[in-house]
Image (cartoon, coloured by chain):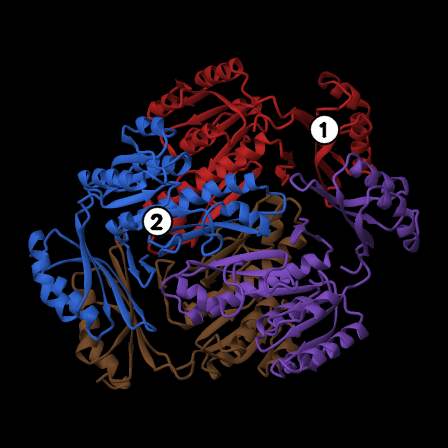
Chain colours: A blue, B purple, C brown, D red
Amino acid sequence: MESTPATATLLVSCADQSGLVAAMAGFISESNGNIVDLEQHVDNSEEAFFMRIEWELDGFSIARDQIETSLEPLLTRFDMQWSLHFSDVRPQVALFVTRDNHCLYDILSRHQSGDLQMDVPVIISNHRTLEPVAQQFGINFHHIPVTADTKPEQEHIQIALLRENNIDTIVLARYMQILSDDFVRNFPNQIINIHHSFLPAFPGARPYHSAHKRGVKIIGATSHYVTSELDEGPIITQDIIRVTHRDTVSDFIRKGKDLEKIVLTRALWRHLQRRILVYKNCTVVFA
Amino acid sequence: MESTPATATLLVSCADQSGLVAAMAGFISESNGNIVDLEQHVDNSEEAFFMRIEWELDGFSIARDQIETSLEPLLTRFDMQWSLHFSDVRPQVALFVTRDNHCLYDILSRHQSGDLQMDVPVIISNHRTLEPVAQQFGINFHHIPVTADTKPEQEHIQIALLRENNIDTIVLARYMQILSDDFVRNFPNQIINIHHSFLPAFPGARPYHSAHKRGVKIIGATSHYVTSELDEGPIITQDIIRVTHRDTVSDFIRKGKDLEKIVLTRALWRHLQRRILVYKNCTVVFA
Amino acid sequence: MESTPATATLLVSCADQSGLVAAMAGFISESNGNIVDLEQHVDNSEEAFFMRIEWELDGFSIARDQIETSLEPLLTRFDMQWSLHFSDVRPQVALFVTRDNHCLYDILSRHQSGDLQMDVPVIISNHRTLEPVAQQFGINFHHIPVTADTKPEQEHIQIALLRENNIDTIVLARYMQILSDDFVRNFPNQIINIHHSFLPAFPGARPYHSAHKRGVKIIGATSHYVTSELDEGPIITQDIIRVTHRDTVSDFIRKGKDLEKIVLTRALWRHLQRRILVYKNCTVVFA
Amino acid sequence: MESTPATATLLVSCADQSGLVAAMAGFISESNGNIVDLEQHVDNSEEAFFMRIEWELDGFSIARDQIETSLEPLLTRFDMQWSLHFSDVRPQVALFVTRDNHCLYDILSRHQSGDLQMDVPVIISNHRTLEPVAQQFGINFHHIPVTADTKPEQEHIQIALLRENNIDTIVLARYMQILSDDFVRNFPNQIINIHHSFLPAFPGARPYHSAHKRGVKIIGATSHYVTSELDEGPIITQDIIRVTHRDTVSDFIRKGKDLEKIVLTRALWRHLQRRILVYKNCTVVFA
């Protein structure tokens, strides 16, 4: 993995216009960049354009720290929103957990085996339950209990800790606290949550109980970016599993764990690959 | 198919008690009945018992028209709700349609090839669009247009037609009218609808439009028995298909047709096999 | 549907080289073409490049019949294999069937409701069973019985009929005859078959019987382009459904019908959209 | 979990005969046993009968150690194969691993959170790679390297270790050695393997490489009991995930890990619940 040649990835979105692909591909081509992946999407109803373009840095005639400046005329001309990433700059990820271990183990074992290109400087929890798991993997664990009264000050401590560790991505790996608007505003499209239902069905608390009561034949899990509206953020990925009348709420919970961990880790993988663009509370998830 | 030996199927539900299976299996066994299938389910949280028991009529020492009387002491002793069916008495099914042809073709072609053991004496529609399809398959088509004003009287005509044809099962194969409470009360747990969403997400009108706006990554379809609460009846079966940001509402509709027809026909098949029990707005669907 | 503006679609494949996307996008852009979709794929292990590019003909400064000539320098420079299609030129599709009706009904009802942009000038069958279905939809039906002895001459009749009708796509909708190498060579990557197993498991005859004997827990269906190797052609799409120990071979067959029709029609839809490229007996299926 | 009342579970199979269910249910009922679950299956083509019956030990008038003796007349009369289990006697499970950590973590974290009712006295591996994981969870790790030459003697050491620990279930959690016939004969229907393909497709080594070369659109994983025929044992459960032309062999491997761990743990869960009967190289997996 480490020996893969470094690449730059540019994510852009703007109003749809003629000549966008040609202009962007031309820019890279003219500077001897070898495009390894280009995916674009036009949303006709919104007249919006989205593109992810990835090219090899080796042989590219523009120095890394000059790319932004060189791109500027193009970005301005098309009035683009954009972000630029380098494959050898590893995302810094914080994991928030409470008591359930399945999502945490899934992410950490995937990380251990090299499937997730990131660093995990810190695990934050409102309980001590999973501290031994953090220790197993040699990761700093911070116990920051939260009550209704202490939430504002505890979130300040959390945010300070995240800033200190240069965290750019927060994963709520079954973290059972609702983040304040203020917290969320600090990390727009940087907080990934897993909700244990097929959203928008069963938002909020105890979705398996509600699903069981309704007598559904399929349960789901949804990963999404966190916004100030609870369980209303842009959906990244979803998956489902079948249930029957024989399954109790406990069975829903047991079966659901498989979904939750897999759906969350998949979303994180795509996020780390810089494959997601957010637009009007929806996501463009490039393949 | 026709040469399969005739069987009797008894569906029962009651409060959970000791000795239920032994008593029911004993009853059949003592009269030389060969049980070909027995499935039971205990809902511990509701302390409720459900059973489907199917046995061969050939060799059974009780005459068909005496089975109810013979069972009565047992049914009374356990205070059971029950229904008794014979595999060689074909259900009489009415299909309600509007303009979309996919569910209608799916049911009729399945019927033509012998996969659905039923008769279809009548197709009812509020439009003439699908009349040629009914003619293709040689089935009586009744055009009964419905407006807000005419609904009560038109439903009377529908009900009269259904009674005349001894209809015991009504399939709403993309019928775009809401049935009145009065109509529904006439056919409890006998009306099967297909809703083009993963209920309880997106009930009501235009679910694909709502799903697209919400940016879901999976769409679904749900078959359920119709009750007086719109899209709130007992769910029989559900299925899903993946969508991406590339899919427009039209793509949702196109992809969804596959789901709708398959989910509806599967539900109908189970219903015809007498494999469904309704309990507290949920279904027990025997395998 | 009919009012969608006409587009041109170019499918190309060649050895991977620098500047490919920029050159192709530049060509269209310089002639005032508005790109509505561009998807490319690089197979690194094969060092191969694939692209599908679709642009609006309205406003494009090169006349339809001049596009090939204008493209030629580019196609030559990169040594590309290519094909050019226009969205308003409808594919001419022949359906081959035997006795099973489910795939035929699925394709014809989808066609009737406008989901498949094609013409179906002819249905060919080695039995008369489905002639009434062809009549229902007003399509010419040709009964061409085939035995081991008569196959060569009957295939000549078939090929003549296909040529006469300008057929460019053949769909084997559960056609239970093996086409000769000679026949297949006449229609490279133009014949779509549905095989009722999850290939490469259970190729050849009676796959459901073999799957049942093996005790699998999932059955599948596979659509693929036909090559001279039976059931070995490039796979287009696959899908699966769960089975249990309760399912008999008849249940496999009944459940499998849903898969077969859906998987075949999906493959046909993608083919008609010119979204498939074949490479080393595999397919690139653009989204 | 621990406070659930203890139950007895009887698994039986025999030739299909009249009166089987009545006799077995009657036996339990007459001794005041409360049946909490009964599932039966008749395989008509094989004329074989299978049943799982579970009843509460509390209130049952026959002492645990007398149940076998009391059942004997019935078992003899119907010529049954049978096994009897008690829910409060925990299965003793050995895990065999090599280098991949995902199945091991999945099982151990599920075990840690109480989802798998078993003890794991020992982990055996032919490499030291996963020793730290065993230590994390406080489980004895035995490094038993195996070469072609040393296999017979090393297997003797393994078997001795398993006997010593009263192991009744062996899980090959991505153990990359083939067990000898002799080893397998010691543990009939007690060794669960995960194979990383949709069997019977791609048995043997490097299935993801073969699947990629074939251009499949879906990959799978299969859990099965190990027999002397490699990858030919009775299938317990299978699952699949979609792939596209964009996925490399590495992507297949990464995606496949999710399948492998989930399919293996599901199979183990059913095995521990005594829900599986093996018959003619197939499984009956009760719901």
Q: Is residue C11 left or right of residue C152?
A: left
Q: C186 or A14, which lies in front?
A: A14
In the current view of this chain or complex, which residue is farthest to the front? A149
The Cα–Cα distance between marks 2 and 1, rounded to whole angstroms, is: 48 Å
Q: D160 or C13, which lies in front?
A: D160
Identify the residue under disc 2.
A267
Q: Is residue A134 visible?
A: yes
The local secondary structure at tag 2 comes to: helix
Q: Position of residue C146 (x, y in %)?
A: 60, 70
Label 2: how many residues lie within 10 Å, few (<14), some (14-19) or many (20+)?
many
Identify the residue under disc 1.
D81
Residue displayed at 47% across by 53% down? A198
Q: Are marks 2 and 1 on the same chain?
A: no
Q: Quadrant of residue B156?
A: bottom right
Q: Check disc 2 and give the amino acid type.
A: Ala
Say the numbered circle drawn on residue A113. Answer: none
Q: Is residue D93 left or right of residue A131?
A: right
Q: Numbered disc 2: what chain?
A: A
Give the quadrant of the C terminus of chain D: top right
Q: Check disc 1 and give the amino acid type.
A: Gln
Q: B113 or A16, which lies in front?
A: A16
